Image: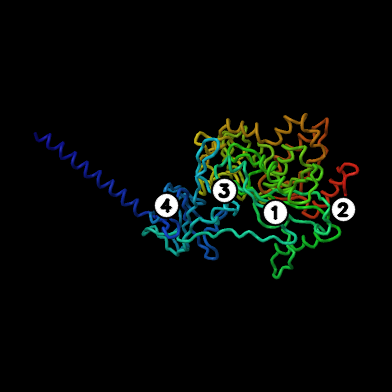
Amino acid sequence: MSGKINRIAFYIFFLLLMLVVVSGCVGKKEKGLRFEISFPESIHTDSITGRVYVMVSENENREPRFQIGPNGIPFFGKDVQNLQPDSSVIIDSKDFGYPLESLSEIPPGEYSVQGFVNIYTRFKRSDGHVLWMHNDQWEGQRWYRSPGNLYSEVKKVKISHSEPGLVRLSCDRKVPPVEIPPDTEWVKRIRFQSKMLTEFWGQPMHLGATVLLPKGYEEHPDTHYPVNYIQGHFSLGPPNGFQAAEPDSENRWAQWGHDFYKFWISDECPRMLLVTFQHPCPYYDDSYGVNSPNTGPYGDAILEELIPEVEREFRIIHKPYARVLSGGSTGGWISLALQIFHPEFFGGTWSLCPDPVDFRYFQCINIYKDENAYHKKSRWIKVPTSSDRSPDGIVRLTSQQRNHMELAMGTRCRSGEQIDIFQAVFGPIGDDGYVKPLFDKKTGEIDPLTADYWRGHYDLRYYLEKNWEHIGPALEGKIHIYVGDMDTYYLNNAVVLLEKFLESTKDPYYDGVVQYGDRMPHCWGPDRIELLKLFKEHIIKNAPEGDDRSWLY
């Protein structure tokens, strides 16, 4: 009997001990630094599915939401579903952040903090998948300044590990709509809803273009002109920074734009139209200009909707020799891909510092042989894989750091950043309808099956080599590539592999240009004025005999 009583007493003691331990753990959890994010019904009446953030800064010069980035301030994010007005969500030490992974890593001190709510839209795509993504509001897929998104006032807080506490942030402010600049005598804009993209995404999707007219356009109503389709990131600004007004300050960008204006109106400048595209998608500030299972038929929409609209609206020579492409970085890849995938539609491309054109050098990653995107392994040694460098070769950012920043901004490739759009454009669709990633964002482990998909669809060197017999004749003399040999993102290495193939071509020889800038970073190549002169020479050389040259006034 006494033994039974002892056993019961032991069990009771054990249960009490467990309650004390659990209670201690709970208490410890509650004492950790936490941020409570909410929004009032007065600012947004519906529930929100999206992602919430808190940003922590020691700098009071700008709002914290404008200080995040690869080398920016700590921020932490969390996905939310059906978050109701006046309800709240907690961001604590378990939620992933960058450049610090956890709130617990923030040193004690005084900080400026800000909450933010990135609102997602429900897309019911034509492929049957339903996705929640940030819908661009013509701001260029920058969620921290996207119209309709919510943010809090900046609050000063003192962070102490001994008394961490709870910080409440009410996102009671809304980002205002984008103001589209008005047309001028020189600069015109078009914007329209794309039938193809709207059908694919199940939401209204828009395309646009900004057009710079040549001097004398109105005075020569019967003249048709060549066109330079400039590829690059989303912008509502005039092509090449054009600015007619004399700068009233020491703003070097304004002066840069005005210097181009002075050349544009000079007798030396070729008379042609310059056109930039606006084609943001739910994954990035532009679509990369190709058809993709994740982003939709942007290649078709640009070739069959956007360019025809531009060429109907403005007096452009509707012949391939008069359509030239250019662009740098993202625009470098797009301009090269458009020329390669549509060799007979365009008359030539000038591609500066293009994004990876051969995935054996996806920056510093060989996606076909490397097992991990974050480090190279040789027996016992693991070396971090670089992402960014300075011209002297010093590493500025690793692949893991860049990707962890994107993961903190958005799960499922929804950060709106560079590597996520690569994965969205180049990769297949996953079982859940979102992007099937090339590698695990947390660990860097590469999926070889996805790498094979990338090669078969978007590796430009591989595509050229596989199809040269058929497309080579239409590309002869049309490919011009420029890159610094110390490109910030190691893009020169892939260009070297592409050049090796191009130089091996026969029947026909590619007869183009690949040039390297000695110790030059991203984005080296001919400047905008030199490019215009190259375009003129190329267009005149390739114009059919007897074709109208009235644009040469």
Residue 513 visible: no
Q: In the rendered structure, which disc, 2 or 4, sits on the residue that comes first in sequence?
A: 4
Which residue type does callout 4 highlight? Ile
The tag earlier along the polypeptide, 3 or 2, is 3
Callout 2 crowding tier (Cα within 10 Å): few <14, some 14–19, many ≥20: few
Task: Give, as a three-letter code, the residue at label 3.
Answer: Gly
Q: Residue at x 51, y 37 (%)?
A: 129
Q: CA distance from mark 1 to mark 2?
A: 23 Å
Question: How far separated are the C-alphas under marks 1 and 4?
Answer: 41 Å
Between discs 1 and 2, the one toward the N terminus: 1
Q: Is residue 157 left or right of residue 319?
A: left
Q: Secondary structure at mark 1?
A: strand
Mark 2: amino acid: Leu
Instruction: Give x and y (percent) for residue 123.
Output: 52, 43
Which marked residue is nearer to the observer: mark 1 or mark 4?
1
Labels 3 and 2 touching (C-beta < 8 A): no
Which residue is label 3 attached to?
416
What residue is disc 1 on? 210
Marks 2 and 4, how far apart at CA? 63 Å
Which three-letter amino acid code belongs to the residue tagged 1? Thr
Residue 161 got which mark? Answer: none
